[in-house]
Amino acid sequence: MFNVLQPEGWAPAKGYANGIEARGRMVFVAGMIGWNGQAQFETDDFVAQCRQALQNIVDTLACAGAGPQHMARMTWYVKDKKEYLARGRELGKVYQEVIGKNYPAMTLVQVADLVEDRALVEIEVTAVVSE
């Protein structure tokens, strides 16, 4: 169902795919932030908010009969690129614990702010489920 696009001669992407080709039913997950299902923040820690946002994605995908293995595209919006880079090892561990070894095409953007003041990260996903 998925074909990872890796141009010949390019160094392998680490932690993401350069591109994904997919066929099937499309599932779009809105930007998820690091609050729980009751729209309450339990922490102001960046990595912990990332974990919660990723779990929110997994929970939302499940509503469509999908999981992390169906993710084709993921976009991260962070308030602090330096913290993202400095805590990369911790973040990678959390990512694998929640998402597994599923690496869609990804984009990371540092933004000036997010709508929710306490939010440090927002992540959106497009998934493709075989029909």
Image (spheres, rainbow, N blue to C red):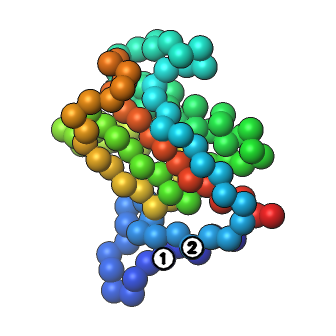
Which residue reaches farthest right? Answer: 131
- Mark number displayed over residue 74: none
Distance (Cα) linking label 1 and label 2 = 7 Å
Residue 5 numbered tag: 1
Q: Residue at x 46, y 61 (%)?
A: 105
Q: Which residue is at the far front?
A: 115
Tell me the residue at 49%/20% (across/down): 35
Q: Position of residue 84 (x, y in %)?
A: 28, 38
Give x and y (percent) for residue 38: 59, 14
Residue 68 placement, left or right of 51: right
Name the amino acid, label 2.
Glu
- Asked which quadrant contains residue 72, the reply is bottom right
How crowded is the residue under tag 2: few (<14 C-alpha within 10 Å), some, or many (20+)? few
Residue picked out by circle 2 = 21
Please tell me whether mark 1 or mark 2 is closer to you in this view.
2
| Residue type marked 1 | Leu
